[in-house]
Amino acid sequence: MRPSRNLLLIVFAWLMWSALALTLAVVEKVMEWPHYSDWLLQGWSIFGVALLFIALADFVLMLLPTAVHAERSVSQSIPVDAKVKVKLKVVNREKYPIRVFVNDAYPEHCDTEGVPENQVIAGGEHLEFSYRLRALRRGDAHFGRVRLLLYSRLRLWQRLQRSGEEEVVKVYPNFATIHHFILLSADQQTVQMGIRQMQRRGEGMDFHQLREYRIGDSLRQIDWRATSRLHKLISKEYQEEKDQNVVFLLDCGRRMRTRDGQLSHFDHSLNAMLLLAYIALKQGDAVGMMSFGGQERWLPPKKGTQHINTMLNQAYDLHPHLNASDFIAVATELNRKIRKRSLVVLVSNFRDEDITELQPAIRMLNKHHLVLLANLREQVLDDVMEQPVESLDDAIRYAETVDYLKQRSQLREHFYREGVISVDSVPRQLASHIVNSYFEIKRSGKL
């Protein structure tokens, strides 16, 4: 409970009245004027007593419980960094109008538009409005009870009242990229997502169906029996092999805390993982994941596009930690859990000094699986290479960047000789690069 602005203004006016009356009384005594100030002091005292009783009466009435409550309506799962609508409803079951100041107890790490709201609700009526909320961090977001600042009947006092229920909302990675991919046709998907169409090599494909010969089909695709029977060229159509495992190793170590723009390297990796997981599930493969370096979680490979929801629930609240990633331990654990040959997708930010630990881990994985190693490259490196060299500092920075990129290139070549498929990418291009590598692996029959 606290005094309202109205009461403070009235008290201030009453004090100014007393100051004026006292000043006039002093002037009258010095100048020997008639005592008109007595009338001002008498009126001041009467007004003060009346104000005291009215304020006390209004205070007592304000202490009585009021039939005003609030309700919140919000989706139980929202994407990060996207504006969502939150609805508030305030019901006044009293017979008289009430002025109320409404503010929601929205979670931390959120931006809002449209709150607070200050309105008068008539007796027996309700107020409905909505505001926009944008969550800036994945994980569990906690909504507290709605805060209502109620005014007394004479609007001399204010009382803070909490109403409604506390809620926990899941903030998922922004799957707008996946949703956009789903809505596109097959041709549009490959063009707009930066995915390259590649010709099939070898026989690592499953037979799908027979169809009429098309220009560009190889002679090995022609089914001569069907051709002689139907008196026209008939080709065999193939599809990528199904029932294969794709397992993601999600690095939650300190290197993944690096930020490019608003998102960390970990967030970019998570978004790319979800897109490739959805595509692999659509291809008929089984997809699983294992996180390490901070929070350790294991999701065994499963098939079906509905499995993407399970992956979202498993990974939505993962965040990079300050721990150093133990690659040997995660390689040992994965080999223990999965014996079937799988495509293991490991995304991290490797440096030259990591090779002593990374190399034995990759060799352990390569004994049983095919490894796709995606190394994230800071965007600032590409920016430095594109900037003109106009000073000695620019030249030194350029030379150091060239040397660092050369070390990364040597690291990639080293793993290539080990039989590892390696990708070096800036975060914003990571999704298209690993999807292209996935399709290349499928069409080559390497897995």
Image: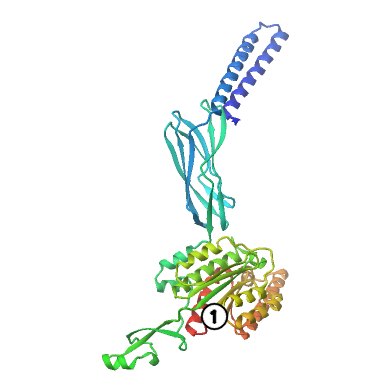
Total marks in image:
1
Q: In the image, 18: left or right of 174?
A: right
Identify the image's colour scheme: rainbow, by chain, secondary structure or one colour: rainbow
- Position above or below: 108 against 61: below
Q: In the image, 433: left or right of 222?
A: right
- Position above or below: 413 against 249: below
- Position above or below: 212 against 281: below
Q: Where is residue 281 in the image (x, y as percent from the top left)?
A: 46, 72
Q: What residue type is labelled 1?
A: Lys
Q: Which of these two is toward me, 51 or 148? A: 148
Q: Which of these two is toward me, 186 or 61? A: 61
Q: Position of residue 420 (x, y in %)?
A: 60, 82
Q: Is residue 406 visible?
A: no
Q: Which of these two is toward me, 415 or 206? A: 206
Q: Quadrant of residue 5?
A: top right
Q: Quadrant of residue 259?
A: bottom right
Residue at left 52%, top 62%?
313
Q: Is residue 205 visible?
A: yes
Q: Position of residue 276 (x, y in %)?
A: 50, 71
Residue at left 31%, top 93%?
225
Q: How crowded is mark 1: few (under 14 residues within 10 Å), some or many (20 or more)?
A: few
> Quadrant where the N terminus lies?
top right
Q: In which quarter of the image is residue 405?
A: bottom right
Q: Which residue was labeled with disc 1?
A: 340
Local secondary structure at mark 1: loop
Residue at left 63%, top 14%?
45
Q: Position of residue 184 (x, y in %)?
A: 41, 68
- Position above or below: 329 against 209: above
